[in-house]
Image: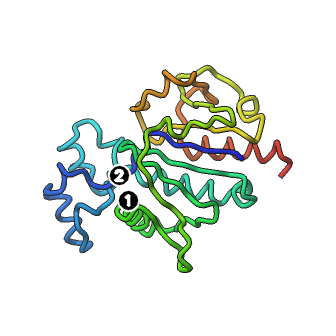
Amino acid sequence: MFNLSIVDAELELVPPTMWDDFQVRKIANSSNKNPRQMLLDSNYMHSAIERHFPGMSNRRGRPDIFHMLLNVVQDSILNKKGMLSIRIHTRNNIIIRIAPETRVPKSYNRFAGLMEKLLVNGKTEAPDGKILMWTEQGKWDSLLMDNCENVLLSPSGERKNIKEICKKKDMNLIIGGFSEGDFLSDVYSALKPVSIFDNELTIWTVAWKSIGTVEDLLGF
């Protein structure tokens, strides 16, 4: 089983300090939503995030990253063969687990609504009642695995070829769930990072390259 673990994902509901922000209220009123149950989204709340969390408006509130990521990985051959597990740890220490058969909406607005439902209710279900995604409390190190190699990817790590890193199908690949900056969690005290490129890459590019390498290894 190839495990993909996302750490410090910038995926969260609107923080309490922003519930009464005029921009957030305006968005909530126009969409007939409760600010407490809305997804933090810098695409629409950039100024509000900057007011309450100066300097963080380009990092916090990035559900669009995970819309792209999940569409890429859930549609992979590895996932369709039942050989991929993806788990997401958020900055608020919420762990999101995803069933392999989950199909992510192609529409970003539908995806955002699905994430809101997940974070509010703790799960999303298929029409037949099967749970597709669910949440639990947990820190980043709860994603570490004892039965396979844990590999941390970071631009600051030692440069290695992707084929050298993903040389076996049973591994746990850990990547950051943010668009800029570094890990908030103390990952470097537990794992020595490695890098697959000299500059930063998007998380969906890293995931796609890694999964594709494993698929080639298995001859798919």
User: Which element is circle 2 on?
Assistant: loop
Looking at the rendered image, the disc whose residue lies closer to the viewer, 1 or 2, is: 1
Q: Is residue 150 above or below residue 218?
A: above
Residue 119: which numbered mark, if any? Answer: 1
Provide residue 164's location: percent of width, then percent of height.
75, 29
Residue 73: which numbered mark, if any? Answer: none
User: Alpha carbon of mark 1 to alpha carbon of mark 2: how far?
Assistant: 8 Å
The residue sitting at 61% across, 40% down in the picture is 206
The residue sitting at 52% across, 24% down in the picture is 190
Crowd rating for badge 2 (residues with CA inside 10 Å; few <14, some 14–19, many 20+): many
User: Which element is circle 1 on?
Assistant: helix
Q: How many marks?
A: 2
Amino acid identity at mark 2: Glu
Provide residue 188's location: percent of width, then percent of height.
49, 23
Amino acid identity at mark 1: Leu
Disc 1 vs disc 2: Cβ atoms closer than 8 Å? Answer: yes
